[in-house]
Amino acid sequence: MSSPTTRGVLYVHCAPRALCPHIQWALESVSHRRTDLQWTPQNAEPGCVRTELEWSGRAGTGALLASALRTLGRVRFEVTENASQGSDGSRWSFTPDLGIFHATTDVAGNICVSEDRIRYAFEASGGDHSAVVSELSLALGEAWDEELEPFRHAAEGAPVRWLHRVG
């Protein structure tokens, strides 16, 4: 039985030029096919570049892409994977300072925080309102959003490429 297919987007928000071939090799190791990335300057960090890649493939491909890229260190990226039959949507964010963040997403791309995670935030807070807010902020990935936001805005109007049938 084959896995359901889905789509997603890889945003390499910021990478040193020297890592471009390594990023391409990492993506090709997941997709088993050649990728032709269009790199553009990342104005938010001089000397760095950015790219976007829309992909389609088996459910779980987003996790494979994020795992392949996070080992490269100085790359800031996000991977989205749309929901598919039997699989929730997901988003992975990575920054060199914060590491990797993963969240389940709904069809509109909103982060879904589980009942268990919310209960944990309340229980771990010991009644301290600011601790609840801190735990929910962590569950929503707010620190990653804050760090990546300047790089997202610098990318408006950038070209997007397609990678089909990943995996």
Image (spheres, grey):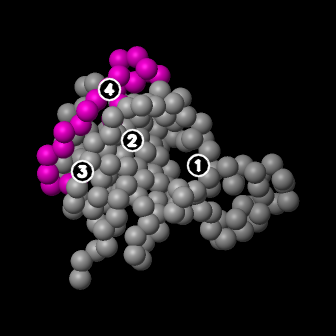
Where is residue 8 drawn, in percent x and y? 37, 55
Residue position for label 1: 141
Q: Mark 3 points at which residue?
A: 163
Asked if residue 44 lies in the magenta stretch, the reply is yes
**Quadrant of residue 77 in the image?**
top left
- First along the sequence among labels 4 and 1: 4
State the residue position of label 4: 40
Numbered range of the magenta stretch: 30-51
Amino acid at circle 3 = Leu
Residue 103 seen anywhere in this rendered image of the structure? yes
Q: Looking at this view, is 161 or 112 the one in front?
A: 161
Residue at the bottom extreme? 1
Residue at figure coordinates x 30%, y 53% from the top left = 55
On the picture, is 11 further left or further right than 138?
left
> Mark 1 vs mark 3: which is more N-terminal?
1
Taking the image as shown, residue 98 lies to the left or right of residue 47, namely right
Secondary structure beneath label 2: strand
In the rendered structure, are the residues bearing label 2 and label 4 in contact, judged by CB atoms less than 8 Å apart? no
In the rendered view, does 107 fall on the left or right side of 50? right
